[in-house]
Amino acid sequence: MSRTASPRICILKADGTNCEVETATAFDLVGARPEIVPMNRLRSGERRLADYDVLVAPGGFSYGDDVAAGKVMAVELMQRLADDMAEFAAAAKPIIGICNGFQVLVRTGLLPFNQPGIMSATLAQNAVGRFECRWVDLVVEAATVSQLAAALPSHLQLPLAHAEGRFFADDAVLARIEAAHQVVLRYADRDGRPTAAYPANPNGALGAIAGLSDPSGRIFGLMPHPERFVRRFHHPDWRRRPADERPHGLAFFERIVALA
């Protein structure tokens, strides 16, 4: 049950972020109160994370992805806003990272194990060595610990666009993630089978991992963009799809609001 009928959503904004408006629109559609919050307003104290119910790091190229994708924002969150971030996570409020935001959460250490400052995985350059922009098939792990997965269809399609989306970790970390059922989404072929084969797995992610959560199930990151499929006509084949089929990204945002 939602803590508040209309939760307040903090959508982080930095130079280079470019998906904040689409993300805010998606939350508007499901009855939340999104606010695009520039990082400097949080640093100055003009805005406080504690005043929000959900924290979202959206897609884009925060700070130009200087050094590495998501690195500068991750450092900023962990050094200048460390106490606020710790309080937010301790309050069990949902923290979401989409594309560049997923890269940010992994570099903070919040994913995969909610260990701030300890980076145990990465989102590396795509195995094909180039930017990938395409729709992908995804399957939801039935046994995942993520509380977001409950409302998602078992098979869904979402668009993605990134150059550094290949989930990579050593064997011990991958085994720990799998044992704790933290994987939420995997890249799949058209028959719904997780795959390592390109282009169905467009970046070469280990374990076909497209999205995962922390052990609590309330911190979640994914490379595809659910905010880009919240209206029927967002899908390139929308005229051929059933008229009563709901956009796959919409369930994602509805569930976040329900958890807030």
Image: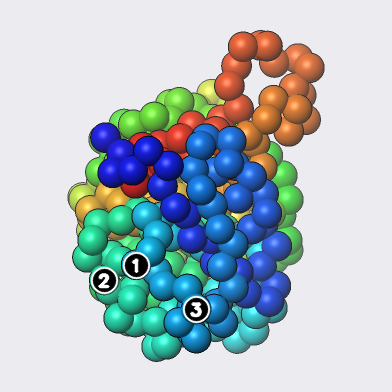
Crowd tier of the residue under label 1, counting other residues whose Cα lies within 10 Å: few below 14, some 14–19, many 20 or above: some
| Residue 247 pos. (x, y %) | 60, 27
Q: Is residue 194 above or below residue 168?
A: above
| Residue 188 pos. (x, y %) | 52, 36
Give the residue drawn at x 33%, y 62%.
112
Closest to the observer, 203 or 33: 33
Give the residue drawn at x 56%, y 82%.
40
Q: Is residue 80 above or below residue 256?
A: below
Q: Which residue is mark 2?
A: 87
Closest to the observer, 72 or 256: 256
Give the residue drawn at x 39%, y 82%.
81
- Please state which amino acid type lies under the numbered disc 1: Ala
Marks 2,1: beta carbons within 8 A: yes
Residue 38 located left or right of residue 206: right
| Residue 141 pos. (x, y %) | 35, 36
Q: Which residue is mark 1?
A: 50
- Please state which amino acid type lies under the numbered disc 3: Glu
Crowd tier of the residue under label 2, counting other residues whose Cα lies within 10 Å: few below 14, some 14–19, many 20 or above: few
| Residue 177 pos. (x, y %) | 28, 55
Q: Is residue 128 above or below residue 31?
A: below
Task: Give the structural element (helix, strand or loop) at label 1.
Answer: helix
Query: In which quarter of the view is residue 250 placed?
Result: top right
Q: Which residue is mark 3?
A: 46
